[in-house]
Amino acid sequence: MGVNKVEAFFSTTLILWLCSLSFHILFNHRTHLLYVLAGSFFYQTANSLIRFFFSKPTDPLFVNTAVSLLHSAVTSTSVIFILSKQWLSNGSSGMFDHSQLVEGTWPWAFEALSFSCGYFAYDQWDMLRFRLYNGWIPSILVHHLVLLICFTLALYRNVTINYLILTLICELHSIFLHVRKVRRMAGVRDAKSSIVKLEWFLNWVTFLVARFASHILITVKLIRDAHKFEKGVELPMALFGMAGMNLLNIGLGIDLLKAFKREKKSQQANHRQHHE
């Protein structure tokens, strides 16, 4: 019964989101929002291709993780491209000013955010379809729903686009999260392997720099510039969203540390058995 209620709630919110998006595209002639649908279609196509090229029935979790890895690679590359292009064209002067982050839109930032928004809609549907979640209140589904709401409202109002692009720097760390998951699914678990050691090194570095530190800095910037926001939902939603992200980052850091210790402990146990 609990599972049915979870599916019913999140499926309904996804349908309402799609209806809202379709209304804006069809009746408000916001054709640039088609990039959101293009993103969903792109990642669903990637999902289908991965399934097609496997000769035997494929684990839905493996396919979902592989597509998530693709999204992280595409998004982080897009964010680096956007920031680098802006930096080279206009320099760092004024790049992170409040007006630029809230009211401005860097070249390709709207398209990149739309494409990523489409991914979260696809991923929400894929997880509901194959029940790739746990619990009565699945954190991953709640996370996707919050991102869909925040991203879509920003795209509708064409505000805080650049702020949201900065938050997507964390996808650089997500690459190594998904690589680790795929690696373990493939049965590669030797903690002493050079590849595994490099993966863990990059995992920790990108977690600390691209996820933890960057989100803290964005939160500090929001708080410092709070008085510059006009009355409305932008500041409360931004602060609420960043508070949620920072809490998730702390939880993720704890989970990473536990996983790292487990792999080390497992490797030591295997080493002792080998020498007995």
Image (spheres, rainbow, N blue to C red):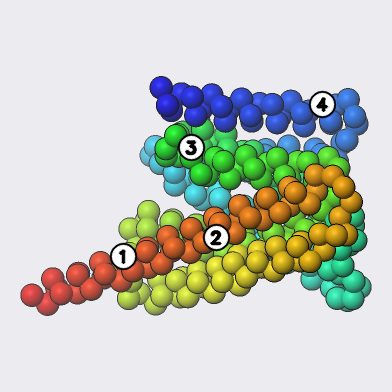
Specify few, some or many for label 1: CA neighbours under 10 Å numbering under 14, 14-19, or 20 or more: few
Gap between marks 3 and 4, in whole Å? 29 Å
Residue at 85% across / 50% down in the picture?
Answer: 159
Residue at 46% across / 70% down in the picture?
Answer: 199
Residue at 85% across / 26% down in the picture?
Answer: 26
The quadrant of the picture occupied by the C terminus is bottom left
Q: Residue tagged by mark 1?
A: 262
Gap between marks 1 and 2, in whole Å? 20 Å
Q: Residue tagged by mark 2?
A: 249
Gap between marks 1 and 4, in whole Å? 49 Å
Most extreme residue toward the left, as rendered? 276
Rendered position, 240 above or below 226: above
- Residue 106 drawn at (x, y percent): 86, 60
Specify few, some or many for label 3: CA neighbours under 10 Å numbering under 14, 14-19, or 20 or more: few
Q: Are marks 3 and 1 in contact (CB under 8 Å)?
A: no
Kindly report which numbered mark, 3 or 4, lies closer to the viewer in this rendering: 3
Q: Earlier in the sequence, mark 3 or mark 4?
A: 4
Q: Earlier in the sequence, mark 4 or mark 2?
A: 4
- Residue 94 drawn at (x, y percent): 90, 71
Q: SS class of the residue under badge 3?
A: loop
Q: Earlier in the sequence, mark 1 or mark 4?
A: 4
Residue 264: quadrant of the picture: bottom left
The quadrant of the picture occupied by the N terminus is top left
In the picture provided, is 199 more to the left or to the right than 143? left
- Amino acid type, mark 1: Arg
Kindly report which numbered mark, 3 or 1, lies closer to the viewer in this rendering: 3
Q: Earlier in the sequence, mark 1 or mark 2?
A: 2
Rendered position, 18 above or below 266: above
- Amino acid type, mark 3: Ile
Q: Residue tagged by mark 3?
A: 137
Gap between marks 4 and 2, in whole Å? 35 Å
Q: Are marks 4 and 2 in contact (CB under 8 Å)?
A: no
